[in-house]
Image: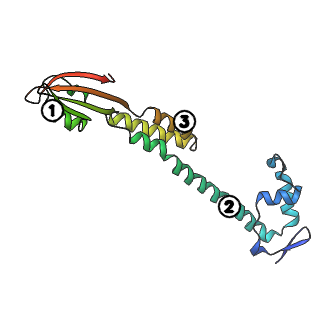
């Protein structure tokens, strides 16, 4: 069966219309507020399109809308991972309590990594440790969960706030100068940066 829209025949198997197409056909251009003209579009359907293909046209419109919705959800999920991922990957909290007299050098290296400077002066080893003081696991998980929930509620718009927040709060840079005795035990500590 062939339906007639205006003066042109339409084959039902080839018919793919959208609300935009119908509005352009009916009004000549897309109106500013398409929802105001829904009764006219319904009238257009009932007067110009055979009942046998009205269902397939509506299903096509619904399918296109569903496909767009699924695409939007996928994009939100793809984009929304940024602040969540950044919160989860923040530096871990270091135990700065180890910078005290009597702690072995090996304990400092295990916690903070290799020193950035290591030299010997007056037969005493002097080292400088530099690191980013991060956050506890609970704080990182809480922040990641909050970012994820905010992304879902705002359909991804939270990323405009979440990403700069995570960049800003990415840990505090700290540096300590440590002097050791002859047994490689901490003799003196001086905080150079942080604390």
* Location of residue 83 in the rendering, given as x and y in whole percent from the top left corner: 48, 41
Residue 161 is labelled as 3
Asked whether 19 or 185 is in front, the reply is 185
Residue 44 location, quadrant: bottom right
Which mark's residue is nearer the viewer, 3 or 2?
A: 3
What residue lies at 71% left-to-right and 65% top-to-bottom? 60
Q: Position of residue 134 (x, y in %)?
A: 34, 33
Task: Using the image as rendered, state which of residue 128 and residue 137 is in the foreground.
Answer: 128
Of mark 3 and mark 1, the one earlier in the sequence is 1
Residue 64, numbered label: 2
Residue closest to the far right: 7
> Residue visible at 60% across and 52% down?
72
Q: x, y (%) of residue 46?
A: 85, 62
Task: Label 1: state its secondary structure.
Answer: helix
- Residue pushed farthest left? 183
- Distance from disc 1 to disc 2, alpha carbons, whole Å, reads 66 Å
User: Image point 84% across, 49% down: which residue?
Assistant: 31
Badge number at residue 105? 1
User: Could you give the CA–CA distance between mark 3 and mark 1, rounded to whole angstroms?
Assistant: 42 Å
In primary-sequence order, the first of circles 3 and 2 is: 2
Q: Distance between the residues labelled 3 and 2?
A: 31 Å
Q: How crowded is mark 1: few (under 14 residues within 10 Å), some or many (20 or more)?
A: some
Residue drawn at the location 30% of the way across and 28% of the way down: 175
Q: How crowded is mark 3: few (under 14 residues within 10 Å), some or many (20 or more)?
A: few
């Amino acid at each position: 069966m062939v339906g007639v829209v205006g003066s042109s025949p339409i084959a039902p198997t080839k018919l793919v219309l959208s609300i935009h197409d119908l509005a352009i056909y009916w009004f000549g251009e897309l109106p500013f507020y398409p929802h105001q003209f829904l009764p006219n579009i319904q009238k257009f359907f009932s007067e110009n399109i055979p009942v046998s293909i009205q269902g397939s046209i509506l299903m096509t419109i619904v399918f296109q809308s569903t496909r767009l919705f699924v695409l939007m959800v996928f994009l939100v999920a793809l984009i929304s991972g940024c602040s969540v991922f950044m919160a989860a990957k923040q530096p871990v909290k270091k135990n700065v309590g180890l910078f005290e007299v009597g702690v072995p050098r090996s304990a400092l290296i295990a916690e903070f990594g290799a020193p950035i400077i290591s030299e010997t002066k007056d037969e005493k080893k002097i080292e400088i440790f530099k690191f980013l003081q991060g956050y506890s696991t609970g704080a990182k998980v809480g922040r990641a969960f909050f970012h994820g929930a905010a992304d879902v509620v705002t359909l991804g718009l939270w990323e405009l706030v979440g990403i700069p927040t995570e960049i800003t709060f990415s840990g505090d840079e700290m540096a300590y100068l440590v002097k050791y005795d002859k047994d490689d035990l901490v003799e003196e500590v001086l905080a150079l940066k942080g604390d």
